[in-house]
Amino acid sequence: MIPTRPELMDESWLEKRLGAPPDTLRSFEHEAVGTGQMCDSFRLTLDWDGHAGPPTIIAKCPSLDEASRHVAKLVHNYELEISWYRDLAANNEVHCPHCFHAEIEANGIDFALLLQDVAPARQGDQLAGVSENALLAAIDELAILHAAYWNSPLLEQLLWLEYGAANKELVRQMLPGLYAGFRDRYADRLSPDILEMGDRLVACIDRYLDYEPHALTITHGDYRLDNLLFAKGQRVFIVDWQTAGVGCGLADLSYLVGTSIADPALRKVGEKPWFDHYLKCLHESGIIPDVEIAWDEYRRYAFSGFIMAIFASMNVERTERGDEMFAVMAERPARQALDLDSLDLLQH
């Protein structure tokens, strides 16, 4: 049985998963870290006896919240992250924490994930936004991920990547009902034009979901500041791979820009240069998309952050920070979609 909380782990279990000799881990302590709502994360401080093991590691575990676990099982969140670290993380140039151990039960819920602690790298702050330099560093890392799997045969070989197609159908079925609840919850927080845009998006969601991108790659699916770790003078660490799948790379980019910039005026000025920077990074890896098609896809997927905010906010444990984070997460890309006239792409 997998120990799904630090208090269920013991020294012997950790020694085996970390490749340490028996009886070299004297003891360990744990403390909660991060702001994730789909699962729980802990920093384990390890006291070694004569072994040069890591002084700290991060353990990710299932959420204690029943609703969060139910959704994670429904859309395979835990399986996707475990599969990323098990099958892909060590075989490309993407910068993410080293994985010591990744294991999940057949029920799709009970798992344990032991990762490198990359402190002093710090989690980005979704509410505060980000500087342009930090944003460009995040775009650099995103292009590395996408270029590695751009129209790759591997996309059809890993069965767990097929979960994305099923999840798309869940969005189709569930979004209208979820949006009704979301609209009521945030009626006093979001402006009328954003709520009206949401009504129109739900009405033409089939055209959004049925679009076939010009190219496919592995996407992160939730590429925003809370899922990025920043350290001075280092590349960005990408974490929280619970929504990894096959899709359009421009969706990740539009999602990042739309959710990260607190000032809409600054986003409007920087949006095209940041888009151009992403294409430049792809070009350096030998990937040369059609610029006009890519820009239209960037505009189309401005809705991705808005849809994620609706789906996530109505399916995970509610917290005060979470409510405001989801409001911001919906508001910024909604304003982006309005500025880019993204609905026009769905209505023609």
Image (cartoon, rainbow, N blue to C red):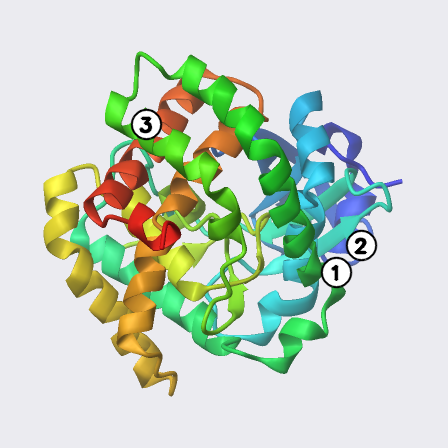
For residue 39, which quarter of the picture?
Answer: top right
Asked which secondary structure carries label 3, the reply is helix
- Mark 1, residue position: 19
Instruction: Please give the count of numbered marks on the rendered protein.
Output: 3
Q: In the image, what residue type sits under mark 2?
A: Lys
- Mark 2, residue position: 16
Eyeballing the image, is 73 above or below 153?
Answer: above
Residue 189 percent location from the top left of the image: 30, 16
How many other residues sit within 10 Å of disc 3, few (<14), some (14-19) or many (≥20)? few
Q: Nearer the viewer, residue 37 or 45?
A: 37
Say if mark 3 contacts mark 2, CB within 8 Å: no
**Badge 3 or badge 2: first in the primary sequence:** 2
Eyeballing the image, is 162 above or below 334?
Answer: below
Residue 348 percent location from the top left of the image: 36, 55
Residue at image position (46%, 36%) is: 203
- Mark 3, residue position: 196
Q: Is residue 173 left or right of residue 19?
A: left
Q: In the image, what residue type sits under mark 3?
A: Glu
Asked which secondary structure carries label 1, the reply is loop
Eyeballing the image, is 54 above or below 334?
Answer: below
For residue 279, which quarter of the picture?
Answer: bottom left
Say if mark 1 contacts mark 3, CB within 8 Å: no
Q: Nearer the viewer, residue 200 or 5?
A: 200
User: Alpha carbon of mark 2 to alpha carbon of mark 1: how far?
Assistant: 5 Å
User: Alpha carbon of mark 1 to alpha carbon of mark 3: how far?
Assistant: 55 Å
Say if mark 2 contacts mark 1, CB within 8 Å: yes
**Badge 1 or badge 3: first in the primary sequence:** 1
User: Alpha carbon of mark 3 to alpha carbon of mark 2: how far?
Assistant: 55 Å
Q: In the image, what residue type sits under mark 1?
A: Gly
Residue at image position (34%, 83%) is: 288
Residue 245 percent location from the top left of the image: 59, 59
